[in-house]
Amino acid sequence: MIIKKIPYGLTDFERIRKEPYYYVDKTHYIEWLEESANFFFLIRPRRFGKSMAADMLAAYYDCGDDTEELFEGLSISQCKSYRKHLNQYDVLKINMQEFLSATSGIDEMLRMLNDYLIFDLREQYSQVRFRDEKNLVQVMKDLTYDNEKENVSIPNREVSQEYINAISRFPFCNTTMKTRCGRIFLSLFSVPACSV
């Protein structure tokens, strides 16, 4: 008999599903999220599973990996929209706590986050010529608009203005932002109110 462990402090959905850990299936909320509003603020105290939920959502949507086996037997696998959305989107999954832990303050963290996101976007979309490679909002705008001169074809190119606004307006929130082309998952970080 395999003794299951409680995944206290673990946020890695894949590890929790593949190793002998207890997992409470919350995937039935995915269908509800698909039918609901575009922005979600998941406000809960520490250790309530926010980061793990964001990791689960990223595993479900991200086209970078085939994660079908992770969702076998879970509620979402019985939904009509399961195949339509499973591994179909580019996903930005951002754990703000990791950035804050690596820096000495919010300003430095935001600079680091800006630099890392731009690096990843330039690497993913190397065929795009960016106007200002140091400005995250401009980089995302450049991904939004067709570059007719170079006739660039990017899958899921319809990055909406909503996507750009979301990343520039909500840097401190634990939120999931749904757009026509992809998903952004920001995982909560905890800082005392006086340091914000």
Image (spheres, rainbow, N blue to C red):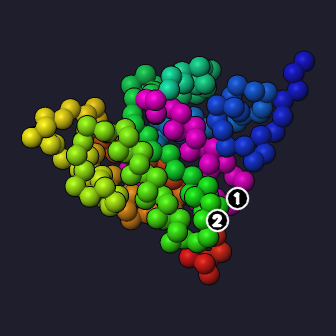
Q: How many dots with numbers?
A: 2
Label 2 CA crowd tier, 10 Å (few <14, some 14–19, many 20+): few
Q: Where 141 sits versus 16, above or below?
A: below
Label 1 CA crowd tier, 10 Å (few <14, some 14–19, many 20+): few
Along the horizontal axis of the image, is 113 left or right of 159?
right
- Give the residue displayed 64% in from the left and 31% down from the top: 14
Amino acid at pointer 1: Arg
Quadrant containing the C terminus is: bottom right
- Give the residue displayed 39% in from the left and 29% down from the top: 88
Q: Where 104 sits versus 89, above or below?
A: below
Residue 73 image position (x, y, % from top left): 62, 20
- Specify the quadrant of the image occupied by residue 84: top left
Determine if the magenta segment contains residue 42: yes
- Give the residue displayed 65% in from the left and 75% down from the top: 192
Q: Which residues are magenta?
A: 35-64
Q: Which one is closest to the eye, mark 2 or mark 1?
A: 2
Determine if the magenta segment contains residue 102: no
Quadrant containing the N terminus is: top right
Amino acid at pointer 2: Ser
Residue 24 image position (x, y, % from top left): 70, 36
Q: CA distance from mark 2 to mark 1?
A: 8 Å
Residue 138 image position (x, y, % from top left): 27, 58
Q: Earlier in the sequence, mark 2 or mark 1?
A: 1
Q: Which mark is residue 46?
A: 1
Q: Secondary structure at mark 1?
A: loop
Q: Secondary structure at mark 2?
A: loop
Answer yes or no: do the residues labelled 2 and 1 have beta carbons within 8 Å? yes
Q: Which mark is residue 190?
A: 2
